[in-house]
Image: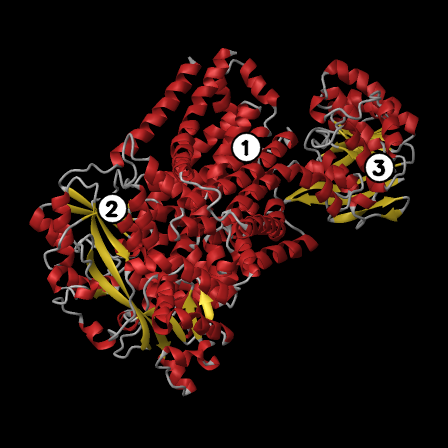
């Protein structure tokens, strides 16, 4: 279980996260929803250990993980632009995390992960030959393959066209459910958030202003801004 | 449209380059005569050097620097059929034979040639001697004063470990004074003895540098190096006085008069010239007293014309050795490669 | 289809004519002249020459590897982090690159480094570190940082991130830098002569010896061909590799340097100070000596022998700017041709452009004087100086622009094309803005190559116009404390000038970012 406890993050001179808190239970999928520039990506990067926090605490199962370098946190992060390694093929990308963890049956695991995302047999395809949707699915497979304790997806469908998004939302949800993962998904799109997640966390100017199920929040928005934003 | 634009652009750029090139190229005319010389001569030419020649004849002198003496001669030979210049200056005894064999010079008996010591003159007048310099061992006076050692006075003294280990010579294959000093040892000890002499020097720890620069400014104790003696020129002490950091009236370095070798530098009219008469006038000018008196302070060598007066610094601090070693150009040409190879075997084998 | 081809022919014409007339033709003429007289049986293609060829290859390979290793920490620091003095550091390391060999050689000798293979290797590292740092950091600073972060989150340690992600992405730039360092050291002349003595002759030294000292033009020509074949072989392998490994990936538009924090700060400081410190040892000797008298003042006074030494600065700057202009135009056009058309023709074109860097100065110099008498007699022309400099500098421009040009995805150009841009317009709107920054890196190199160049200049017939290196050489050629002190002061002037101009050009790069 992930615990984010009143953390502050300043980038340059600008405070980006201001006393942000968020808890994610094991097996739960939480979507962080907010307008662009509200600090969603910064929150993911802080949890992943890619940037330092100025105060507060981040815990896993009650243990603080501040000071644990990101490569030892066993968290997965899917980047907004996917950040696929251009010098490796699809198989190489998916195998990367497995190699780092010292897995034995990398070839099998890679094949399995590609099947989860309906890209069975794509191992030797070069990255620059993939379509946008395929890249998204390779990135997802790469994130899931090493079986991280926590999966974080940053605008997982942001760059794709609408039809593709509809389909991939369902696919992504299915894959996450099948794996039973704990996940945090960052998005600015309400429909995407409600389709992918069990619970929403509304973020505004560096703080989580309300959490709860979609219909709960809709029925009882914390303030006018939240009501406005969800419409 | 786009294609034409690109093509036009490329052609125009090219045309510009060519136009620019041709604009910069020399336009040969009787108003200009070209002198090719080695870099160190060209570097010492100022606007005053040929001013009175131009005044008298109305002809400008353009100087081309053509690298070191070896490159100079090679370039003259390679361009024999379409010469780069009208007059060449700077060929010395070590490269002279090669130039003469290729017949790149026109015969010319210079006006003041009878004012030159007969030993320097080419009897067939294919080239005209302009200057000479003596390659000698220089020593650092302050080192010898502080160690209370006696300055060696002949080449044999240098066989002693004490001296040889404080001597830097230049490599004969890469340095002109280096080759001159090897010639001095051959002159002194003969074909039978010179290699033994070098074997002794090597045994005793003589230091070999690649060129004069690194020997003088790298290895010489006067400039922070390990050697208190270095193969340089008899004219180096006056240069030390003239170019001292603080004005001084004593030279910090001295010359060992034994074991010197005399290098002579010649000028010649290049056979392919279009203006042999003006070229001849230029050679005459270079041997005239006016030009000859300019030589010591500009290039630190001695004028070939005996009527030329030496500047005071040369009178006070320079030494003209009485009996320097000297070989004929043809003797050097026949043996040089063998000598250098034998020297390399002894010194590096 | 034919339309596009014609466009490329037009763009290819300038670099092709340039390299053809100023390199291939002169070199072919002089080699032909030499080989016509070659008598294989009589010439000494013996064990000694084999040993020389072997040594040349060996020392060049080792020098390249050592330079890459020595440059790695500083390259990392200046690529990854933004810190005070970063630009100064990258400018300072460029200084050795332009210093005349004779100055550095004297400094090394006076430090007691003479006559060993280690001195040669150390000097090669000293001279070439800038090539690696500058070529590689251009690419490195613009790698999408998410790639490295993705690897970290997937469990890679810092070292593994570097080894499996950063380094593979940098391979084109590393290979480009390595190829230039290899060519420089393969044809090393002054360093080998001054610091190695005759026993460590390279092919370059032997070609000079055979041609100039021993007058054996045929053997020199044969050796020059051995050298050319070696260089061509290495370049061919390199260009095959480069083309096979070229990966299309989107470079970040701006550099992604960040402020170092914590342990990184200490490592950055250590990398910068250690590299600058090591490179400074020979430089400090030079600076100290230049201040041991009133030598700077004397640079401005008229010397009876060499004139006003400081006036050489103007000549040097003029030549350097012209050479930079020629090299940049020719180099960028050539790079456009090479990226535009894949296949063996463009591969050979690329390779030929690199050859001048790996050809002995004697060969090119003698080639010039036998070949360039017609149609216009260029041999005694001042223009030959910047042209000779540009010939050596073009490879820098090509090498620093190619990786960037190759990384532009086809779709970007296609997008512009579909939006109605003609091929030349696509080049102007897409390639040129993206490549201009990399071209500036190449231009800066072209400038300093010209500023510091001495070897080729001394083979090119030229009127009595002193450049800074020839002035230094002239001053060092006569005895006396003042001569020496002024030469050192002149070398410091050259160093300061280089650092200043490199910083200025680097700043222009930064100013350009807003224009994307």
Mark-to-mark CA distance, 3 and 2 = 77 Å
Q: Quadrant of residue C21?
A: top left
Rendering coords of residue C152 (x, y %): 76, 41
Rendering coords of residue B232 (x, y %): 34, 69
Q: Residue at x 72, y 43 (%)?
A: C163
Residue A98 image label? 3
Q: In which quarter of the image is residue A9?
A: top right
Question: What kind of element bears circle 1?
Answer: helix
Q: Where does label 2 land, which residue?
A: B104
Question: What kind of element bears circle 3?
Answer: helix
Do circles 3 and 1 both sit on a common chain? no
Mark 2, residues whose alpha carbon is within 10 Å: few (<14), some, or many (≥20)?
A: many
Q: Which of A102 and B152 is in front in this view?
A: B152
Mark-to-mark CA distance, 3 and 1 = 34 Å
In the image, which is nearer the foreground, mark 3 or mark 2?
A: 2
Q: Residue at x 24, y 73 (%)?
A: B320
Q: Residue at x 90, y 35 (%)?
A: A105
Q: Where does label 1 land, which residue?
A: C402
Contact (Cβ within 8 Å) of mark 3 with mark 1: no
Do circles 3 and 2 both sit on a common chain? no
Mark 1, residues whose alpha carbon is within 10 Å: few (<14), some, or many (≥20)?
A: many
Camera sees residue A145: yes
Instruction: Write down the chain letter for disc 2.
Output: B
Q: Which of A5 and C160 is in front in this view?
A: C160
């Amino acid at each position: 279980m992930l615990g984010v406890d009143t953390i502050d993050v300043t980038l340059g001179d600008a405070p980006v996260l201001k006393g942000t808190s968020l808890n994610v239970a094991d097996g739960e999928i939480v979507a962080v929803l907010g307008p662009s520039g509200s600090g969603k990506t910064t929150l993911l990067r802080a949890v992943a250990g890619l940037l330092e926090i100025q105060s507060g605490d981040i815990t896993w199962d009650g243990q603080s993980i501040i000071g644990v370098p990101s490569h030892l946190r066993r968290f997965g992060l899917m980047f907004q632009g996917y950040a696929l390694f251009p010098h490796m093929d699809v198989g190489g990308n998916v195998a990367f995390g497995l190699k780092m963890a010292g897995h034995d049956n990398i070839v099998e695991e890679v094949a399995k992960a590609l099947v989860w995302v309906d890209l069975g047999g794509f191992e030797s395809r070069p990255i620059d030959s993939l379509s946008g949707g395929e890249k998204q699915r390779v990135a997802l497979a790469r994130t899931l393959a090493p079986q991280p304790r926590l999966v974080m997806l940053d605008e997982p469908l942001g760059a794709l066209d609408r039809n593709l998004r509809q389909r991939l939302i369902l696919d992504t949800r299915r894959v996450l459910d099948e794996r039973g993962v704990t996940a945090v998904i960052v998005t600015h799109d309400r429909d995407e958030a409600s389709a992918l997640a069990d619970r929403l966390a509304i973020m505004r100017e560096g703080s989580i202003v309300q959490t709860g199920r979609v219909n709960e929040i809709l029925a009882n928005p914390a303030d006018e801004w939240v009501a406005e934003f969800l419409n | 449209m786009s294609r034409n634009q690109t093509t036009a652009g490329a052609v125009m750029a090219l045309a510009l380059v060519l136009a620019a090139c041709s604009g910069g190229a020399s336009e040969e005319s009787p108003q200009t005569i070209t002198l090719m010389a080695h870099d160190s001569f060209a570097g010492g030419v100022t606007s005053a050097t040929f001013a009175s020649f131009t005044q008298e004849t109305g002809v400008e002198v353009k100087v081309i620097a053509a690298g070191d003496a070896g490159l100079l001669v090679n370039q003259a030979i390679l361009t024999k059929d379409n010469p780069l210049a009208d007059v060449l200056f700077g060929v010395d005894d070590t490269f002279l034979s090669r130039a003469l064999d290729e017949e790149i010079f026109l015969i010319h008996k210079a006006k003041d040639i009878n004012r030159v010591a007969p030993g320097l003159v080419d009897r067939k007048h294919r080239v005209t001697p302009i200057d000479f310099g003596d390659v000698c061992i220089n020593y650092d006076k302050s080192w010898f004063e502080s160690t209370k050692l006696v300055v060696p006075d002949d080449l044999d003294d240098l066989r002693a470990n004490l001296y040889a280990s404080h001597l830097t010579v230049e490599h004969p294959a890469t340095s002109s004074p280096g080759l001159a000093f090897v010639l001095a040892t051959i002159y002194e000890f003969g074909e039978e003895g010179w290699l033994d002499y070098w074997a002794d020097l090597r045994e005793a720890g003589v230091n070999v540098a690649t060129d004069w620069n690194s020997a003088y400014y790298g290895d010489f104790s006067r400039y922070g190096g390990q050697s208190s003696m270095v193969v340089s020129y008899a004219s180096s002490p006056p240069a030390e006085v003239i170019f001292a950091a603080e004005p001084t009236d004593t030279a910090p370095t001295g010359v060992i008069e034994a074991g010197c070798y005399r290098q002579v530098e010649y000028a010649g009219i290049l056979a392919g010239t279009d203006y042999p008469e003006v070229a001849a006038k230029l050679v005459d000018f270079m041997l005239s007293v006016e030009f000859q008196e300019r030589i010591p302070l500009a290039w630190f060598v001695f004028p070939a014309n005996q009527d030329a007066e030496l500047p005071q610094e040369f009178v006070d601090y320079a030494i003209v050795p009485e009996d320097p070693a000297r070989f004929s150009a043809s003797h050097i040409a026949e043996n040089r490669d063998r000598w250098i190879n034998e020297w390399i075997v002894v010194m590096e084998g | 289809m034919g339309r596009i081809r014609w466009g490329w022919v037009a763009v290819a014409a300038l670099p092709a004519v340039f390299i053809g007339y100023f390199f291939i033709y002169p070199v072919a003429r002089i080699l032909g002249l030499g080989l016509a007289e070659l008598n294989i049986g009589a010439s000494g293609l013996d064990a000694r020459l084999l040993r020389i060829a072997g040594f040349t290859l060996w020392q060049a390979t080792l020098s390249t590897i050592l330079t890459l290793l020595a440059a790695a920490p500083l390259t990392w620091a200046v690529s990854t982090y933004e810190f005070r003095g970063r630009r100064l550091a990258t400018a300072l390391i460029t200084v050795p690159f332009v210093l005349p060999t004779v100055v550095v050689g004297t400094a090394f000798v006076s430090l007691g480094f003479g006559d060993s293979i280690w001195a040669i290797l150390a000097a090669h590292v000293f001279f070439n570190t800038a090539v690696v740092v500058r070529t590689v950091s251009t690419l490195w600073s613009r790698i999408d940082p998410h790639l490295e972060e993705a690897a970290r989150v997937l469990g890679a340690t810092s070292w593994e991130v570097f080894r499996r992600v950063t380094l593979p992405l940098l391979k084109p730039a590393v290979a480009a830098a390595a190829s230039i360092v290899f060519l420089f050291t393969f044809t090393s002349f002054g360093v080998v002569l001054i610091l190695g003595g005759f026993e460590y002759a390279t092919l370059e030294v032997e070609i000079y010896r055979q041609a100039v000292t021993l007058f054996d033009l045929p053997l020199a020509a044969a050796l020059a061909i051995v050298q050319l074949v070696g260089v061509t072989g290495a370049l061919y392998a390199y260009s095959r590799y480069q083309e096979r490994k070229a990966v299309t990936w989107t470079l970040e538009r701006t550099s992604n340097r960040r402020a170092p924090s914590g342990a990184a700060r200490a490592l950055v400081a250590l990398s910068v100070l250690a590299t600058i410190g090591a490179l400074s040892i020979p430089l400090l000797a030079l600076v100290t000596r230049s201040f041991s008298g009133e030598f700077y003042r004397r640079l401005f006074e008229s010397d009876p022998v060499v004139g006003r030494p400081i006036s050489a600065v103007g000549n040097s700057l003029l030549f350097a700017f012209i050479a930079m202009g020629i090299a940049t135009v020719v180099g960028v056009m050539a790079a456009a041709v090479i990226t535009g058309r894949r296949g063996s023709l463009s591969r050979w074109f690329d390779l030929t452009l690199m050859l001048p860097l790996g050809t002995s100065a004697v060969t090119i110099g003698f080639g010039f004087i036998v070949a360039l008498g017609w149609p216009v007699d260029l041999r005694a022309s001042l223009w030959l100086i910047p042209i000779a400099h540009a010939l050596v500098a073009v490879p820098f421009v090509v090498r620093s622009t190619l990786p960037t040009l190759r990384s532009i995805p086809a779709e970007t150009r296609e997008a512009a094309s579909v939006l109605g841009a003609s091929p030349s317009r696509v080049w102007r709107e897409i390639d040129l803005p993206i490549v201009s920054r990399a071209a500036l890196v190449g231009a800066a190199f072209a400038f300093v190559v010209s500023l510091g160049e001495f070897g080729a200049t001394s083979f090119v017939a030229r009127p009595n116009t002193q450049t800074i290196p020839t002035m230094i050489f002239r001053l060092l050629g006569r005895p006396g404390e003042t001569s020496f002190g002024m030469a050192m002061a002149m070398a410091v002037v050259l160093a300061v000038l280089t650092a200043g101009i490199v910083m200025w050009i680097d700043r222009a790069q930064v100013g350009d970012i807003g224009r994307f």
